[in-house]
Amino acid sequence: MLIDPSEIVIGGSIGARPELLDRIRHFVPLCCSRPLEITKSRLGDHAALAGGASVALSRLHISLFAEGQRGAEIKVPPPAIENFKAVNS
């Protein structure tokens, strides 16, 4: 397997803890030959929820409109960050 990311986004409880993010930023350069941006997810604890909803909507679309057709996946627009911030307030 070949992985060549330009950025790693850390979400959930790990991304919320600055000391863990600092450790990741310290050790990743030891494993990578080129600089790599490491950022905290803007979705915070809602990252898994948003991802799961995206997968569910895509599968629902396929089951209703495109069963058995290749390439029938839909692109779900990114979640509106401001809506997630309102939930956290």
Image (tube, rainbow, N blue to C red):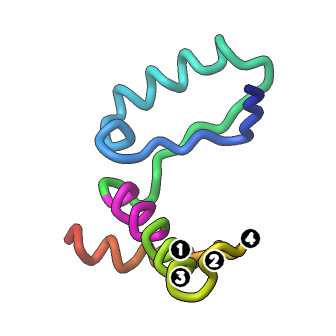
Q: Amino acid at mark 2?
A: Ile
Callouts 2 and 1 close, C-beta under 8 Å:
yes
Identify the residue shown where x is 70% and y is 32%: 36
Image coords of residue 40 (percent x, y): 47, 46
Numbered label attached to residue 61: 3
Spatial CA distance of label 3 from label 4 is 12 Å
Closest to the observer, 55 or 78: 55
Mark 3 neighbour class, 10 Å CA radius: few under 14, some 14 to 19, many 20 or more: some
Q: Amino acid at mark 4?
A: Gly
Please give the residue where the numbered disc 4 appears in the rendered image: 71
Is there a contact, CB below 8 Å, between mark 1 and mark 3? yes
Magenta portion: prevailing SS class: helix
Q: Which of disc 4 and disc 3 is earlier in sequence?
A: 3
Residue under the point 43% across and 70% down: 56
The quarter of the picture where residue 28 lies is: top right
Name the outermost residue toward the top: 30
In the rendered structure, the answer to whether residue 87 lies left or right of residue 85 reads left
Looking at the picture, does residue 87 appear above or below residue 44?
A: below
Mark 3 to mark 2 CA distance (whole Å):
7 Å
* Region of the chain picked out in magenta, as a range: 46-54
Identify the residue at horizontal 45%, vertical 61% (top origin): 51
Tag 2's secondary structure? loop
Q: Earlier in the sequence, mark 2 or mark 1?
A: 1
Query: Which residue is under mark 1?
Result: 58
Q: Is residue 61 left or right of residue 22?
A: right
Which class describes the residues within 10 Å of circle 2: few (<14), some (14-19), or many (20+)? few
Q: According to the image, label 2 marks what residue?
A: 74
